[in-house]
Amino acid sequence: MDLRQLRYFAAVVREGQITSAAKKLNMEQPPLSRQMKMLEEELGTPLFDRTGRKLVPTEAGRRLYERSEQLLVQLEEALLEIRELGEGVGGTLAIGAVVSCISLLPSAIERFGRDYPAVAFKIQEGDHFQLAELLRKRQIELIVARLPFEAPPGADDYGIAPLPADPLAAVVPADWPEYAGRGTVRLNELSERPFLTLKTDRTTGMHERIMHEFAARGAAPRIFCECSSVAVILALVAQGLGASLLPRSVLSSFRSEDFRVLELEDALLQADVGLIWLQGRYLSRSAERFIRELFGGTPEGIRG
């Protein structure tokens, strides 16, 4: 068994088919099939259940896949560390962000690019669970997300650098007459109209905090829609279908004459934000520098 076979094996498990795995690996199907047969013969046990349309790993296959993923990630990190010993800061920095934090990235990337013009970026959106999985697989190095980070149970240890909190503001349709000419709104007023809340099935922290603030004032919003997309919520508000509370940084990326942004006059609601990475994993130089750029220093756990 060698590392090449492990890479082939991991690709077949991910794709569930020899044909599509061969395409991913830029090789022909017969040599890949032979490699899988040789691996099974060497280990003396079947690694795949071949009775269905897709190749499903057996118990032995699942265990080998888990171990091989760890080994391949460690090898990739070691090679990256060695390459960077003789190079400057460059390459591609992969970052994940929840949709409500995407607007925090452009200015940070612009500042970072002035000092490190050789760095390119790859940015992916997702919820906390999706981004935690991408981080585990090293498909991204950093996450920008609302705190607390709602990772799956039993997840890895994370390094977290808190960023400046993001105040929430109310967004109401421009044609609602009771808000004409106003710059502020009381929280319980928003319970008198349909309410649109930013929420996914698995990440509910900000939603629950908002509901708690309503309850503390003896109010209960009439939730008309739960949605994971800021853009969709704002489109619904612009259509006159309801009001919402959203992070102010998000609202700065949208301009419309069809909704009005109001400050909360009786509540200090804010979304906590953090920059997240995996503890115990090698961070590329570009990732380290980017953390310092956003954090404004060197947080604990990052090389100085």
Image (spheres, rainbow, N blue to C red):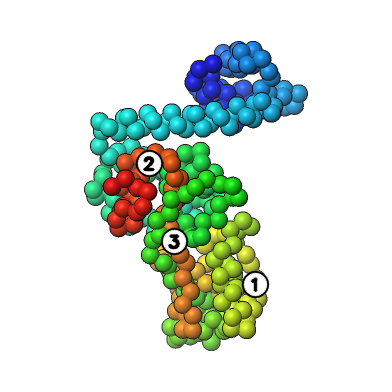
The type of residue carrying mark 1 is Ile
Instruction: Identify the mark at residue 283; answer none if there is no mark.
Output: 2
Instruction: Identify the mark at residue 273; answer none if there is no mark.
Output: 3
Query: Distance of mark 2 from mark 1, alpha carbons?
Result: 42 Å
User: Is residue 252 found left or right of 83 in the rendered image?
Assistant: right
Closer to the camera in the image, 35 or 148: 148
Give the residue at x 24% y 50%.
114
* 84 w.r.t. 190: above or below: above
* 243 w.r.t. 100: above or below: below
Element type at marker 1? strand
The type of residue carrying mark 3 is Val
Closer to the camera in the image, 79 or 194: 79
Residue 122 image-quadrant placement: top left
Disc 1 versus disc 3: nearer the observer: 3
The type of residue carrying mark 2 is Leu
Give the residue at x 25% y 37%.
88
User: Is residue 106 found left or right of 244 in the rendered image?
Assistant: left
Q: Residue furthest right?
A: 51
x, y percent for residue 257? 45, 73
Instruction: Identify the mark at residue 223; answer none if there is no mark.
Output: 1
Element type at marker 2? loop
